[in-house]
Amino acid sequence: MPTFPYPVAHPVPLFLAPMAGVSESPFRRLCRRYGADVVVTEFLSAEGIRRENEATIAKLRFGADERPIGVQIFGGEPGPMGDAAALVTDVFQPEFIDINFGCPVKKVVRRNGGSGCLKDLGLVQEVIRAVVKNTHLPVTCKIRSGWSEEMRDPVKIGLHCQEAGVRAIAIHPRTRTQMYTGSARWEEIGLLVQALEIPVIGNGDIKTAEDAFRMHKETGCAAVMIGRGSFGQPWIFTQVRALLNGETPRATPGVEERFALALEHARMVQSYEVDPEGAAIEFRKHLGWYVKGLHNSADLRRKLHVVNSFGEVEGIFEEYLAEHAANQSLEAAAP
C-alpha cells in the first residue's frame, strides 16, 4: 500500500472532505474529535490568497487540534497558484497543500478553476508544477473522472497528476457535467488504485458508515474521504473506524446527545465568527442536518431555519425535549 507523505494515525485514514461553507474550523475540530484522521480546509481562491483578501485569509485559520490538515486552493493560472502556495506555506504551515481539480460549481469553472482544468491536462500539469515549485510541503489534488462523458478518463488524469508531482490523489468518480446526479462509479476508484503508485483516496456517495467500509473493500483505496455523509453526523468517522477494525460500531446518538452536540458546535461557531447574527443564520443548515430523521423533524426544521440567534436554538431544543419526554412517559404508562 502506498504511504502518505504526512503523518496519519491509521493504515486506512479517514478524511473530512473540503466543502465550501461546511468544513470550517469548528466542524473540522468536531470531526477530528470523532475520528477523522485528516481534514482539509474549504477550497480557497488562489487570487484571494495572493491578494491577501481579508475574508479568504480568515478561512485559512486553524488550530493545533485540527492537524494534520491540508489547505485546498483552486485557480486556472499556474503563476497565481504558485504564489498562493508560497504564502500558505510560509504563513500557515499546514501539513500539505491540495489542489482542487474537482469542483463543478459554475462560478469556479467559469474561471477555469476546479474541474474546469480537466479540459486541458497540459494546464493541469502546469498548475501542479507551479505549486510544487513554490512549496516544500507535499502537494496533493482532488479530481473528478473528467469534464464530460466524452472526456471521461480518470486513469489518464491521474497519471498526468502523478507525473507532475502530486503525492496523493482523491477522486470523486463523477464527471463535471454530472454535477451530483447519477451514481459515483466506484469501480473507477479501483482502476486508479491499480494504475498509480501514489495513495488514492476514494470519495463519493458515502451516506453511512457501511458505505465507507464497502468503498474501501471494493476499491482497495488507501483512504476514504467523507463529505456529505458527515453532515449532522460527525460520529460517522467513529463508526467507520469500528467497521475497519472489525468491531461493532456505536449506535447513532439519541436525541439528547444529538442536541447537546449541535449546541456545542453552535458555541464553537459563535466563538469563531465575528458576526453573531450572521453566524447563527449561516448555522441554520447544520441545525437542519442534526435533526434529520427525528420525530416531527419537518416541523422542527421549520422552526430552526428562521432563528437569528443561538439562544433561540436552545429554546427550541428545550421545548422539543420536553415534548419528547412527555411522549415517552405516555408510552411507558400505556397498557
Image (spheres, rainbow, N blue to C red):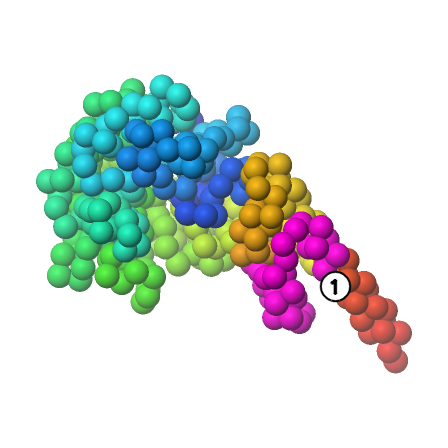
Q: Which residues are magenta?
A: 288-316
Q: Is 141 within the magenta?
A: no
Q: Position of residue 212 (x, y in %)?
A: 44, 52
Would you name the residue on which mark 1 appears? 320
Left or right: 263, with 224 as reference point: right
Q: Position of residue 48 (x, y in %)?
A: 33, 35
Residue that appears at 61% across and 65% down? 301
Q: Is residue 22 above or below residue 38?
A: below
Q: Position of residue 118 (x, y in %)?
A: 18, 48
Residue that appears at 27% across and 55% down? 106
Q: Position of residue 139 (x, y in %)?
A: 29, 30
Q: Is 309 within the magenta?
A: yes
> Can residue 209 be seen from the camera position used here?
no
Q: Name the amino acid, label 1.
A: Tyr
Residue that appears at 41% across and 47% down? 20
Specify the quadrant that holds the N terminus: top left
Looking at this view, is 187 or 248 the one in front? 187
Residue that appears at 26% across and 46% down? 114
> Can residue 68 be seen from the camera position used here?
yes
